[in-house]
Image (cartoon, helix red, strand yellow):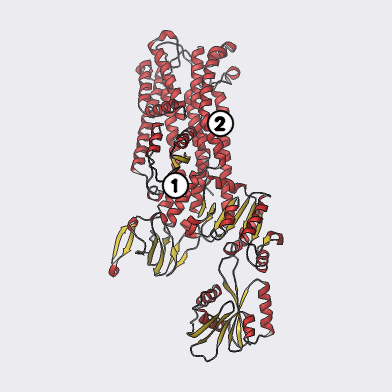
Amino acid sequence: MKCGGCVRSVEKTLIEHTAVSNASVNLVARTAWVELEDPEQDIEAVLASLEARGFPSRQRETNLLDQVAEIEPKDLGQWWDEWRQLIVALMLLLLSVLGHLAEGGRLNLPILGTLPFHAALASAALFGPGFKLIRNGFRSGLAFEPSMDTLVALGVVSAYLASLVALIWPRVGWPCFFNEPVMLLGFVLLGRFLEERARFRTGRALKQLAQLQPDKARLLVNDQVIREVRVGALRVGERVQLLAGDRVPVDGVVIQGQSAVDVSSLTGEPLPLDAKPGTELASGSLNLEATLVLEVRRVGFDTALARIIGLVEQAQARKAPIQGLADRVAGRFCYGVLALACITFLFWWQFGTRIWPEVLHASGQGLIHGHAHGINHSLHAGMQTPLGLSLQLAITVLVIACPCALGLATPTVITVASGQAAKRGWLFRGGDVIEMADSISQVIFDKTGTLTIGRPLVSKVVPEKGFDSQRVLQVAASLEQNSRHPLAHAVLQESQRCELSLLVPTSTSTFPGQGLVGNLDGFSDVFRVGNPDWLKNEEVNFTSLIENHIDQASRAGQSVVGVAQGEKLLGLISIEDRVRPDAVKSLDRLRKNGFELAVLSGDRKIAVENLGKKLNLNKDQLGWQLLPAEKLNRLEQLKCLGRVAMVGDGINDAPALAAADLGIAVGTGTQIAQDSADLVLLGDRLEALPEAFLLAKRTMSKVRQNLFWAFGYNLIALPLAAGVLLPGFGLVLSPPIASLLMAVSSITVVLNALSLRSP
């Protein structure tokens, strides 16, 4: 595929096939996502229909992870074929230029200036480097799906045949311009090669992601024997050894060792992860310090890295709505150009030269050169005749038109943007998602797990007089060490952070919703940990100072756990779900960028209000104790005021994420495949949210710039090529200059897309 016309032709061929229910074609990646009516149906018939239309295709059997890390031999061979064709075309172009110099007497090689020599060059160009392009162009034209190749082929062959007729029958007085096919093909092939190189760079981010998975792994077998095996041969449950500097080959859990692991390649997290037994690691992470032993949990397509790459591929395949306009225009563009070329030819042949006879003399100026007719001054001979002028202008119209720029304007930018986003741990699910992100005006947050860390942590320990905080924490953790309650987990985590040695409980009893009662080895007293009201009912004494602290903690939305020994209160432990460290900064950035903010939560009123104070949110921007159905109703009301993005944890907020215009999941890690979000922000950085919105805005700005350039170029270039400036200014474009401008147009679009890679 070379242009938007090719995309339309491929999509039309696929969608018209009885076996296909839907299809989306990516010009940059040259891939098509096809949805079959019957998933079990063989796709060979679909591939055959594409082959018949002039687009040889093959089914990709494996995930991109196995293919993009290195250029395939087939692709490499095609690359060298194109390089050889380009070298031959440029050599022929150089000989054509030398022929011009010899014809003008500036080079003492008379044979180079003869008409037979230039005819031989043109024949070599057509049947050599230009043959494939011409064949594909006419094949598309005969199928009534003209493409850029069709336009170039018509221009080249028209110039060649007209010159051939003039060579065989000089009396017809037709112009000879055998140099036009040579120069046209040389410039077109050069432009396409440079465009291909630039387009290759657009997918580099995705290739770098694929290269994060190593080829080999150190498998631990019986008796601690280590064997180096292919990563593809690993199975769930096996153990692999990671040395310092190794990349994690599969998703797994650490069962032995402790080390720092760099996860920035997948999540964008700048700080390394402290990996220890029980820590889950995703494929592609980098072990930094010490040896680890990993138990394999997921392999192949199920790994986090494979799913990330799959999501990026889908993002590049799913079109932005703005691309639909460009594709529709590009698909019909070639018909319009063919019609304009015919009109241009007929107008200047039959009418233009009669209305403005002076153009026959002016047409030898500007960007073309006229020569006297004759066998010794053969090139451009007869340009001052109406037929010669009209033929050249028609060829110029065919060649200068650029549906390539229209076809590449959007997908190149989307490809670069989605690849750059993936490198930072942001996964847009399609070009349509990026376009939607650009139009968002309101951002709604869930509370727990989104604006807060999502798990309770000890915020303060208040000991009673005569006791210290470590004693209070040690007793509570000793009783709670066998409990699965979230608050118990927070107490245990804090005791581990303080490196406290726990006492051995001899017996414990649980009172659901109240607390724990038990004995500790070495003590005769009964110990209690639980709700302060419950402890009061158990005749535990509370001082006024402790009562004041309980009131303050309750007003702050904190949970309070009392610790008692017999009837004596040892102290209180305040526990809360802490606000993410970067939440205030992230919301401030969103607010400064013009977004309206709100929080919808099912949590208690007091907890949500306290969160709002910390995040500088007004009371009317908060919603609390909302059931899922109520949250959806609030979202629908907000959508009447503008496009809404909902930010949640991506799992238990799935209904709200699906109902919003843009669903955003934060920190879901390896669960991305199950998310219903449109945008997934891996890792725990909430600051990634305003950065992702900024990338979406930059992306759509580049898309609009490309479309403006592509449409603007054709709107200006086509009238110039048709001779609109010829009567007044005597200016006319030659076909070689037109082909060069056409190539520059496509390359400009791709290079503008690549500028997204810079900060």
Q: In this rendered view, identify the residue nearer to me: 376 or 735.
A: 735
Left or right? Give the position of 619 relative to 199: right
Q: Residue at x 40, y 38 (%)?
A: 46
Quarter containing the N terminus = top left
User: Residue 297 is drawn in which quadrant?
Assistant: bottom left
- Residue 440: x and y in percent read 62, 49
Q: In this rendered view, identify the residue nearer to me: 576 or 358.
A: 576
User: Residue 107 is drawn in which quadrant?
Assistant: top left
**Circle 1 sits on which residue?**
204
Q: Secondary structure at mark 1?
A: helix
- Residue 417: x and y in percent read 52, 47
Residue 545 visible? The answer is yes
What amino acid is labelled 1 in the image? Arg
**Circle 2 sits on which residue?**
713
Residue 604 against residue 55 in the figure, above or below = below
Residue 259 against residue 72 in the figure, above or below = below
Residue 190 against residue 667 in the figure, above or below = above
Cα gap from disc 1 to disc 2, whole angstroms? 28 Å
Q: Residue at x 39, y 13 (%)?
A: 167
- Residue 575: x and y in percent read 59, 74
